[in-house]
Image (spheres, rainbow, N blue to C red):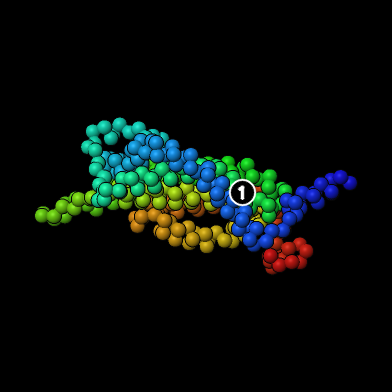
Amino acid sequence: MAEPELEEEDKKPEDDVEMSFFEHLAELRTRLIRALAGILPGVAVGWIFRETVFEWLAIPWNRAHANTDMSASRLWFWFTHPVGDPSLVDVERVPLHYTGPMDPFVAYLVMAAIVGLLLASPWVFWQLWGFIAPGLYRRERRLALPFVFASTVMFTFGVYFGFTLVLPLAYQIFLDYGGDVGEHVVLTEMVTMDSYLMLTSRLLIAFGLTFEVPVVITFLSFAGVLNWRQLVRFGRWWLVISTVLAAILTPPDPASQIMMAVPLNVFYWISVGLAWAFGPKVDKVDKDGLTEDGYER
């Protein structure tokens, strides 16, 4: 008789306490303050090592100027060697300009904030979980640590993927549009450090969030909100949505858009497989679209 009682207890929300709208706002404010407090130490670290971090962020720009071939071996080398690159030894230092006296300070400050967000991402995801956990069942709250771990890993991997592969390839494509135009015109880039930093950080964060898709979908499936059959039916629409997202979040070149759209779809169907294996069971449906109990699905 103890097992049914435990099962019933497992289905009850935490403490079964209802919160008003303003109580939800107060809880959200508390979680945001805690998240920001966790980001500040990372911002300090980013500011102390600002020159080193900016030199690392400039690696895709330097690799784009190296004029190396875009073979599979070169891309694999970039992916496995995010910092060191012997091909950059003989490349002249690429200038990044600034037009105002405060531009370097603002650029370094923004970069330090991004570094703080990346370093504190496990803490931020934990605060996000803490905000939504009270409305979940106990069996769903057991996913807390896997959710935080998977979110951190996938966000980091998305940033790494964009840094090592997408950015150098995209910047090299853009640079190919410059150079000699006819016999009397030369197009030369004059990129400022703030514009480069803004574009680079926007793309890195976009790829980090893109790689969160399987985490969110898998969690919704484990929580019983979605099942694998609904995800399969939605697959055709997800193809359109992922293409639109890739076009919005990446520069207007096909290579970078494809390199975002492909992972979005691959991870989506991996999530479908996980939902099929571990998600809620779906009743069998006959040819008329009815379940064994006669209900329409």
Q: Vertical placement of 84 versus 118: above or below? A: above
Q: Estimate the x, y position of residue 288 in percent, counting from the top left.
A: 69, 68
Q: Estimate the x, y position of residue 145 in percent, counting from the top left.
A: 63, 42
Q: How many marks on residues?
A: 1
Q: Estimate the x, y position of residue 80 in percent, counting from the top left.
A: 41, 35
Identity of the residue drawn at 30% across and 48% down: 102
> Looking at this rendering, what residue extends furthest in the left direction?
184
User: Residue 146, can we see it?
Assistant: yes
Work out whether residue 151 or residue 169 is closer to the camera in this orientation and state it. Answer: 151
Question: Is 257 placed left or right of 179 in the picture?
Answer: right
Question: Is 186 placed left or right of 11 in the picture?
Answer: left
Question: Is 17 placed left or right of 208 in the picture?
Answer: right
Callout 1: helix, strand or loop?
helix
Identity of the residue drawn at 32% across and 41% down: 58
User: Residue 271, can we see it?
Assistant: no
Work out whether residue 113 or residue 258 is closer to the camera in this orientation and state it. Answer: 113
Work out whether residue 48 or residue 213 is closer to the camera in this orientation and state it. Answer: 48
> Looking at this rendering, what residue extends furthest in the right direction?
1
Identity of the residue drawn at 36% across and 51% down: 199
Can you identify the residue that label 1 sits on?
129
> Crowding near pointer 1: few (<14 within 10 Å), some, many (20+)?
some
Work out whether residue 224 or residue 261 is closer to the camera in this orientation and state it. Answer: 224
Q: Vertical placement of 67 versus 276: above or below? A: above
The amino acid type found where label 1 is placed reads: Trp
Question: Is 290 placed left or right of 211 in the picture?
Answer: right
Q: Estimate the x, y position of residue 242 in percent, counting from the top left.
A: 47, 57
Identity of the residue drawn at 10% across and 55% down: 184
Task: Look at the image and tell me in which quarter the C terminus lies.
Answer: bottom right
